[in-house]
């Protein structure tokens, strides 16, 4: 089969009903390789819901693909140097996709497949996030020994004012406030976890002081409420008031990766240890319903604990790597401590919030799935 930019692959679609809930499940990919949706903080659906954007290693390294939804052909969008597998972010109108390759942010036009380098930085970038108005991007960055985030305009000609904003520790998941693109929330690793900073680099502030024994993860904005929602693994789903910092518990269960709806009234999440399936949580009442089972392996030794990884965890990973010379200790550490990310479901909503996109390696390889959410639960 011909591969490369613009290559067309036949549909890999199939469907079935979930064995636990009866929900209709659409399987979008079926290649014997790693295939997964965009990261749970970004939508995998184009705004018109006619296509799903996903990352696949079917050509040997991470590249960007799209599948006509539900059962159309698959088209390869990128080739050449690998992209950051969890970096793609779809533009507001859906015509472009922004992604990271090395130390650069790129944009690709879905119609022409023309790629444009939006901005380049001296370092390695992580997952990309766009402001709600589509004018700005942000991404985590590691430059030498210095961590931080980068910020710039999504228009290549407007990046005279691009910035690197340094931070003292590893940065994860920077994201713009959906109601005020002047503000960016990001995670520091390890604790304390939650911080905010203005887009111009001012106003850096820790939002919640806690230590490594309180395993705060996967914080994000609670839709358009302006508040934050986060998990204290594996104990509870919680909400923080952006202004007062008041925290309250929404529900006590092992919520993991979380995605709120736009109104901030529902939270979609996966679960682990035990995996009780994808859950849809009502924010006001804490009542939750199961959408479907994920049946994903959800790897990572750290998820068996209720604290962040500490020195002995990384030492153990290094010792394991000494026995397996095919992996460096850091590669082994990532796989064993926090787990291969492609083995985690990372659910997200469709634009109309009627479906949940997730990954599962139930078949032996991570694949892209879409579960229909019953009207009664929305």
Image (cartoon, helix red, strand yellow):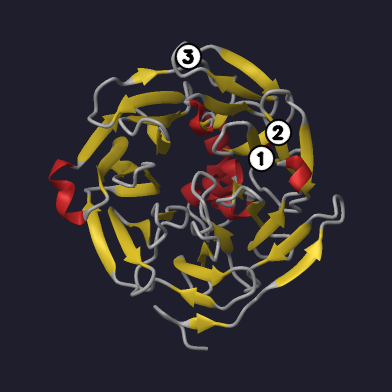
Residues 67 and 134: in front is: 134
Q: Residues within 10 Å of mark 1 (few under 14, many from 20)?
A: many
Of pointers 2 and 3, the one earlier in the residue sequence:
3
Q: Position of residue 217 (x, y in %)?
A: 56, 31
Q: Considering the image in quadrants, where does the C terminus appear?
A: top right
Which residue appears at 51% of the width and 60% of the height? 48
Please tell me in which quadrant of the rendered image residue 16 appears.
Answer: bottom right
Which residue appears at 31% of the width and 37% of the height? 149
Q: Residues within 10 Å of mark 3 (few under 14, many from 20)?
A: few
Q: Residues within 10 Å of mark 2 (few under 14, many from 20)?
A: many
Mark 1 to mark 2: distance in Å?
Answer: 8 Å
Q: The residue tagged with tag 1: helix, strand or loop? A: strand
Of pointers 1 and 3, the one earlier in the residue sequence:
3
The relative height of residue 72 versus residue 248 in the rendered view (above or below) is below
Please tell me in which quadrant of the rendered image residue 11 appears.
Answer: bottom right
Of pointers 1 and 2, the one earlier in the residue sequence:
1
Which residue appears at 25% of the width and 64% of the height? 116
Residue 269, disc: 1
Mark 1 to mark 3: distance in Å?
Answer: 25 Å
Is residue 340 in sight in this rendering?
no
Residue 209, disc: 3
Mark 2 or 3: the one toward you:
2
Which residue appears at 43% of the width and 55% of the height? 88
Q: Which residue is labeled 2 in the image?
A: 281
């Amino acid at each position: 089969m011909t591969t490369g930019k613009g290559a067309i692959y036949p549909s890999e679609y199939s469907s079935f009903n979930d064995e636990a809930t009866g929900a209709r499940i659409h399987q979008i990919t079926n290649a014997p390789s790693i295939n997964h949706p965009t990261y749970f903080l970004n939508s995998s659906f184009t705004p018109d819901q006619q296509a799903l954007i996903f990352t696949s290693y079917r050509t040997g390294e991470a590249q960007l693909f799209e599948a006509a939804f539900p059962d159309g052909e698959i088209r390869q969008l990128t080739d050449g140097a690998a992209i950051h597998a969890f970096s793609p972010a779809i533009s507001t109108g859906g015509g472009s996709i922004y992604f990271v390759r090395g130390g650069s942010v790129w944009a690709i036009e879905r119609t022409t497949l023309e790629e444009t380098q939006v901005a380049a930085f001296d370092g390695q970038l992580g997952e990309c996030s766009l402001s709600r108005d589509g004018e700005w991007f942000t991404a985590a960055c590691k430059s030498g020994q210095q961590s931080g985030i980068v910020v710039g305009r999504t228009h290549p000609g407007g990046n005279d004012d691009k910035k690197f904003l340094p931070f003292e520790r590893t940065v994860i998941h920077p994201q713009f406030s959906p109601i005020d693109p002047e503000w960016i929330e990001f995670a520091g690793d390890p604790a304390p976890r939650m911080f905010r900073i203005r887009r111009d680099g001012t106003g850096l502030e820790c939002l919640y002081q806690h230590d490594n024994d309180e395993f705060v993860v996967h914080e994000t904005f609670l839709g358009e409420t302006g508040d934050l929602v986060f998990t204290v693994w594996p104990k509870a789903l919680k909400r923080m008031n952006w202004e007062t910092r008041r925290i309250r518990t929404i529900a006590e269960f092992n919520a993991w990766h979380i995605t709120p709806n736009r109104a901030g009234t529902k939270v979609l999440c996966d679960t682990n240890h035990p995996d009780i399936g994808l859950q849809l949580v009502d924010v006001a009442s804490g009542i939750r319903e199961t959408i479907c089972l994920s049946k994903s392996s959800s790897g990572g030794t750290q998820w068996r604990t209720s604290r962040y990884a500490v020195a002995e965890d990384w030492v153990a990973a290094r010792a394991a790597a000494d026995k397996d010379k095919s992996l460096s200790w850091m590669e082994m550490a990532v796989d064993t401590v926090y787990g291969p990310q492609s083995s985690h479901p990372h659910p997200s909503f469709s634009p109309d919030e009627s479906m949940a996109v997730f990954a599962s390696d139930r078949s032996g390889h991570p694949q892209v799935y879409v579960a229909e959410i019953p009207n009664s639960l929305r």
